[in-house]
Image (cartoon, grey):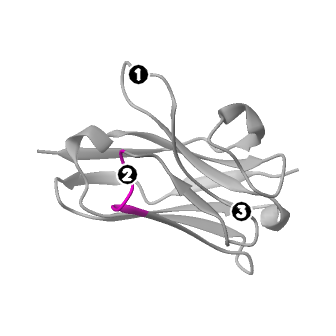
Amino acid sequence: QVQLVESGGGLVQAGDSLRLSCADSRRTFSNNGVGWFRRAPGKEREFVSRISWRGDITDYSDSVKGRFTISRDNAKNTVYLQMNSLKPEDTAVYYCAAAIGAIGSTYAGAYRYWGQGTQVTVSS
């Protein structure tokens, strides 16, 4: 069973960068697409980014496109989300998730396993 652990969150100022990591402690998600989602206070969970198991297909929400970059290292069973030019509206709990298939999706229902989340807070 896939077990995902996010790390790398923290408190930063607007314009700063963070890199989130999503590690599969069971070393099994190299065949799965992986997505990042976030939930801001008082808001619903939203799609942020996804990457296919080969890393050749990526996708971003309009709100992060051009600022965030998703990547993966299957040898390390880890997916990364590099977040640059952070804004206060990026403040949220960020979750990674392993998809049922190899591509991933913008739809949360396509993901079977979820991490516990990591808090990102961006001050103005």
Where in the figure is residue 77, as x and y percent of width and height?
A: 72, 70
The span picked out in magenta is 63-68
What is the number of the mark on residue 99?
Answer: none
Q: Residue at the spot x=65%, y=68% of the render?
A: 78
Q: On screen, 65 above or below 118?
A: below
Q: Nearer the viewer, residue 76 or 37?
A: 37
> Could you tell me how far apart the alpha carbons at marks 2 and 3 are, in whole angstroms?
18 Å
Magenta residue check for 12: no
Q: Earlier in the sequence, mark 1 or mark 2?
A: 1
Q: Residue furthest top?
A: 42
Q: Nearer the viewer, residue 105 or 90?
A: 105
Q: Nearer the viewer, mark 1 or mark 3?
A: 3
What is the number of the mark on residue 64?
Answer: 2
Q: Residue at the spot x=25%, y=54% of the render?
A: 86
Estimate how packed mark 3 is, as few (under 14), some (14 to 19) or many (20 or more) residues with alpha carbons within 10 Å. many
Local SS, label 2: loop
**Amino acid bearing label 3:** Ser
**Amino acid bearing label 1:** Lys
Q: Residue at the spot x=41%, y=21% of the render?
A: 43
What is the number of the mark on residue 52?
Answer: 3
Q: Does the CB distance between marks 2 and 3 fall below 8 Å?
A: no
Residue 25 appears left or right of 39? right
Estimate how packed mark 2 is, as few (under 14), some (14 to 19) or many (20 or more) residues with alpha carbons within 10 Å. some
Residue 67 appears left or right of 30? left
Q: Residue furthest bottom?
A: 75
Q: Earlier in the sequence, mark 1 or mark 3?
A: 1
Magenta residue check for 67: yes
**Amino acid bearing label 2:** Val
> Could you tell me how far apart the alpha carbons at marks 1 and 2 are, in whole angstroms?
17 Å
Local SS, label 1: loop
**Which quadrant of the rendered structure holds the C terminus?**
top left
Q: Please name the residue that numbered disc 1 is placed on.
A: 43
